[in-house]
């Protein structure tokens, strides 16, 4: 007599083998997501979002940068006020990560209402052995090098 399908034991054996193989693959990949390249990509995306927010809201938006982190501000009622809603909450760079902005420890990237920065800038992220550079050009383009 011929059976159709698989027994429960056969299915459990296959699932166990697949889980073991997946575990080996994950363990062989190693740690990811904690280097300057990852931090630079995340920062560049958020800077581009700040530029876009300045355009869509019609209010200047700035990104302040320090050695240990960054945050966002919006110009309203003749002063800069912190932005606290997602994705514009401030953030730290992470463990062992240091940032410099055009060789200064602290700076600001301010976008006007048409998305242009006050000045072109570069932000360098380094963990001591590796580094990545986020550049904001005069036309508002944000790139990671």
Image (cartoon, rainbow, N blue to C red):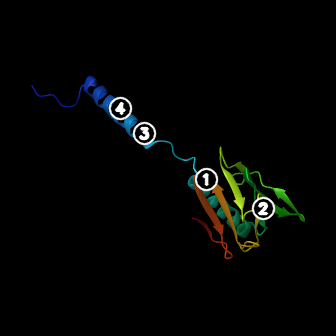
Q: Name the residue under label 4.
A: 20
Residue at the image position 67 percent from the left and 76 percent from the top: 139
Q: Tag 2's secondary structure?
A: strand
Q: First in sequence, mark 4 or 3: give its number.
A: 4
| Image quarter hosting the N terminus | top left
Q: How crowded is mark 4: few (under 14 residues within 10 Å), some or many (20 or more)?
A: few
Question: Which residue is labeled 2 in the image?
Answer: 107
- What residue lies at 38% left-to-right and 36% top-to-bottom? 24
Within 10 Å of disc 1 (Cα), the crowding (few <14, some 14-19, many 20+) is many
Q: Give left or right: position of 4 versus 32.
A: left
Q: How far across and down, in percent of the image, does residue 14 sit?
A: 29, 31
Front-lying residue, 133 or 71: 133
Q: Position of residue 102 (x, y in %)?
A: 72, 65
Please name the residue that numbered disc 3 is placed on: 26
Give the mark nearer the N terminus: 4 vs 2. 4
**Disc 1 to disc 3, C-alpha distance:** 22 Å
| Residue indicated by mark 1 | 39
- Residue ranking furthest to the right: 78
Q: Distance between the residues labelled 4 and 3?
A: 10 Å
Quadrant where the C terminus sits is bottom right
Question: For numbered disc 4, what is the local secondary structure?
Answer: helix
Mark pair 2, 1: CA separation: 18 Å
In the rendered structure, which disc, 2 or 1, sits on the residue that comes first in sequence? 1
Q: Dot 3 surroundings within 10 Å: few (below 14), some, or many (20 or more)? A: few
Instruction: State the CA–CA distance, disc 4 to disc 1.
Output: 31 Å
Cα separation between marks 2 and 3: 39 Å
- Residue ID at (67%, 49%): 93
Expressed as whole percent of the image width and height from the top left, the position of residue 2 reads 11, 28
Q: Can residue 87 be seen in this view?
A: no
Instruction: Name the secondary structure under disc 1.
Output: helix
**Which mark, residue 132?**
none
**Residue 95, placed above or below residue 46:** above
């Amino acid at each position: 007599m011929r059976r159709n399908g698989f027994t429960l034991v056969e299915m459990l054996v296959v699932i166990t083998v697949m889980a073991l193989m997946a575990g080996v693959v994950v363990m062989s990949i190693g740690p990811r997501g904690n280097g300057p390249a990852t931090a630079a990509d995340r920062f560049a995306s958020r800077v581009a979002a700040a530029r876009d927010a300045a355009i869509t809201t019609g209010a200047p938006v700035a990104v302040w940068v320090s050695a240990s982190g960054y945050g966002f501000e919006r110009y309203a009622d003749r002063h800069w006020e912190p932005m606290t809603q997602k994705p514009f909450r401030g953030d730290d760079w992470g463990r062992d990560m240091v940032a410099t902005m055009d060789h200064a420890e602290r700076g600001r990237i301010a976008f006007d209402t048409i998305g242009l920065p006050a000045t072109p800038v570069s932000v360098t992220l380094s963990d001591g052995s590796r580094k990545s550079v986020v550049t904001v050009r005069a036309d508002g383009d944000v790139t990671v090098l």
